[in-house]
């Protein structure tokens, strides 16, 4: 009963678009290789199941009839299948969940995303041979990584359906990597599908040329009620906890799930929400800034430590650490370079993790001052943080709407400054002083 789209919370329109595209894609496969798809298996050894055609758009016209693609007159937008897609929406709206679900529907042996067949299952668990997921580890996705990916994506799908590349946070592509990707999207191999995820289609997030080659699937910030429902249904979380977590996470599904399940995530949030109470003077403001920065560093270090260590061990094994035979000296020189590369990548990933952790803290803090503001205005809206509502109410009385708004703006300015590469400690100190002074 639950198919691959079941976890796309509050995104009915996007789901309709994706279901239709998956059905169209399945029809394309049937038309291209009727014997193969009826047999349910690709031809063995070298035979190319995609060999029957090389132009997806031309085939789409045959299958769906003329007028299916978006740019044809009288077309019904979103009906057909296309090679490149962008999923946009605010953090936590489920961009990557949507991309994975769509990938599963494309690989589904029934062509629907049934959620139970091997195609669906292996795609969702990340083990499908023809689905590659790129998650940026550092601040950006580099050109070498992208070139290698594009090359592999051009090969014939081993499962006889589609070769799929999912790029999470496509807004973190470097310009060179973007160009490498653009080339592939401009002249896509017949069975290759690119699924990009980005916050928006703003040129800062995705280049205009890439955007112009992709179909956009916009996702909305899901309502708290829908988030709570999925936490209860899918994760078996108690309804009252789910409701609290969904509100506190402000529509971010993954964050809501973490808050509901992970006591450490709750503790970190409690510490952040204790900040407004702690700001009793200049010294306290600097202390609070240090505490916030250090908590973000600790959280980030914990989140990357395990994978860092595993990578280092894997590289050392691959390089044959401790080898002394002939050629070992040359190998050592080469391996020093590889180790350095790895350290560079890991450092970049750690920086990203720190920024993400700090940003989560700032979003929580912004929620607190937003609550104070709505209370001062007596606006009929539910608080973000039900557990600190009393404190926000006291703030509302003391600061009034104007003071609450100034504080909210100080938090948002801090986020913007960090995004613009101001050193996080300086931005956070300035914010804490502004919050204290009001
Ligand atoms: Zn399936």
Image (cartoon, grey):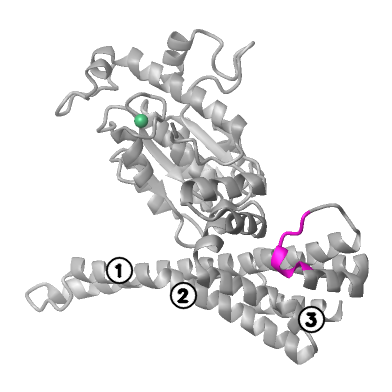
Q: Secondary structure at mark 3?
A: helix
Residue wearing tag 2: 301
Q: Reply yes or no: does residue 386 show up in magenta.
A: yes
- Where does the image place residue 183, in percent across and percent down from the top left? 45, 37
The residue lying toward the viewer, choosing from 385 and 27, is 385
Q: Quadrant of residue 418?
A: bottom right
Q: Which mark is residue 187?
A: none
* The N terminus lies in quadrant: top left
Q: Residue at x 52, y 8 (%)?
A: 66
- Which residue is tagged 1? 310
In the picture, measured across the screen, residue 414 lies left or right of residue 421, that is right
**Mark 3 beta carbon near ligand 1 (under 8 Å):** no
The quadrant of the picture showing ligand 1 is: top left
Residue 194 picture location, percent across and down:
45, 36
- What range is drawn magenta here? 382-389
Q: Is residue 362 left or right of residue 117?
A: right
Q: Looking at the image, is mark 3 or mark 2 earlier in the sequence?
A: 2
Up-down: is 79 above or below 62? below
Of the image marks 2 and 1, the number of the one nearer the N terminus: 2
| Residue count near mark 3 (Cα–Cα under 10 Å), binned few <14, some 14–19, many ≥20 | many
Any part of residue 420 in sight: no
Q: Position of residue 197 (x, y in %)?
A: 53, 44
Q: Nearer the viewer, residue 165 or 15?
A: 15
Q: CA distance from mark 2 to mark 1?
A: 14 Å
Pick whichever, 207 or 302, lies toward us: 302
Image coords of residue 82 (percent x, y): 48, 26
Which quadrant, please, contains the C terminus? bottom right
Q: Give the CA separation, mark 1 to mark 3.
A: 41 Å
Residue 433's disc number? 3
């Amino acid at each position: 009963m639950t198919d691959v789209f079941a976890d796309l919370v509050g995104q009915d329109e996007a789901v309709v678009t994706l279901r239709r595209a998956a059905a169209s894609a399945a029809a394309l496969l049937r038309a291209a290789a009727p014997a193969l798809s009826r047999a349910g298996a690709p031809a063995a050894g070298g035979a190319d199941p995609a060999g029957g055609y090389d132009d997806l758009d031309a085939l789409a016209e045959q299958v769906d009839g003329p007028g299916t693609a978006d740019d044809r007159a009288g077309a019904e937008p979103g009906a057909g299948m296309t090679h490149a897609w962008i999923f946009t929406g605010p953090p936590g709206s489920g961009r990557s969940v949507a991309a994975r679900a769509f990938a599963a529907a494309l690989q589904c042996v029934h062509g629907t995303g049934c959620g139970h067949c091997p195609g669906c299952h292996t795609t969702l668990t990340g083990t499908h041979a023809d689905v590659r997921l790129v998650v940026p580890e550092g601040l950006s996705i580099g050109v070498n990584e992208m070139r290698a990916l594009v090359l592999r994506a051009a090969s014939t799908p081993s499962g006889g359906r589609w070769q799929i590349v999912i790029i999470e946070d496509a807004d973190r592509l470097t310009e060179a990597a973007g160009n490498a990707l653009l080339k592939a999207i401009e002249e896509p191999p017949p069975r290759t599908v690119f699924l990009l995820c980005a916050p928006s289609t703003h040129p800062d997030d995705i280049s205009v040329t890439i955007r112009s080659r992709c179909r956009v699937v916009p996702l909305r910030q899901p309502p708290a009620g829908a988030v709570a429902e999925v936490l209860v249904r899918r994760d078996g979380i108690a309804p009252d906890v789910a409701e609290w977590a969904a509100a506190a996470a402000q529509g971010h599904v993954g964050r809501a799930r973490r808050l509901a399940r992970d006591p450490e995530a709750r503790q970190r949030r409690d510490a952040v929400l204790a900040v407004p109470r702690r700001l009793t003077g200049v010294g306290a403001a600097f202390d609070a800034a240090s505490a916030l920065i250090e908590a973000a560093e600790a959280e980030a270090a914990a989140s990357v430590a395990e994978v860092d260590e595993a990578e280092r061990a894997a590289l050392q094994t691959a390089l044959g650490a401790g080898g002394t035979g002939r050629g070992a000296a040359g190998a050592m020189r080469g391996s020093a370079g590889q180790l350095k590369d790895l350290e560079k990548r890991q450092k970049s990933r750690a920086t990203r993790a720190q920024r993400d952790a700090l940003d989560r803290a700032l979003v929580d803090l912004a929620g607190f001052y937003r609550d104070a503001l709505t209370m001062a205005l007596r606006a009929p809206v539910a608080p973000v943080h039900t557990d600190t509502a009393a404190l926000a109410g006291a703030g509302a009385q003391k600061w009034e709407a104007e003071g609450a708004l100034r504080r909210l703006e100080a938090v948002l300015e801090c986020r913007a400054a960090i995004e613009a590469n101001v050193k996080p400690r300086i931005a956070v100190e300035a914010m804490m002083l502004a919050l204290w002074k009001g």
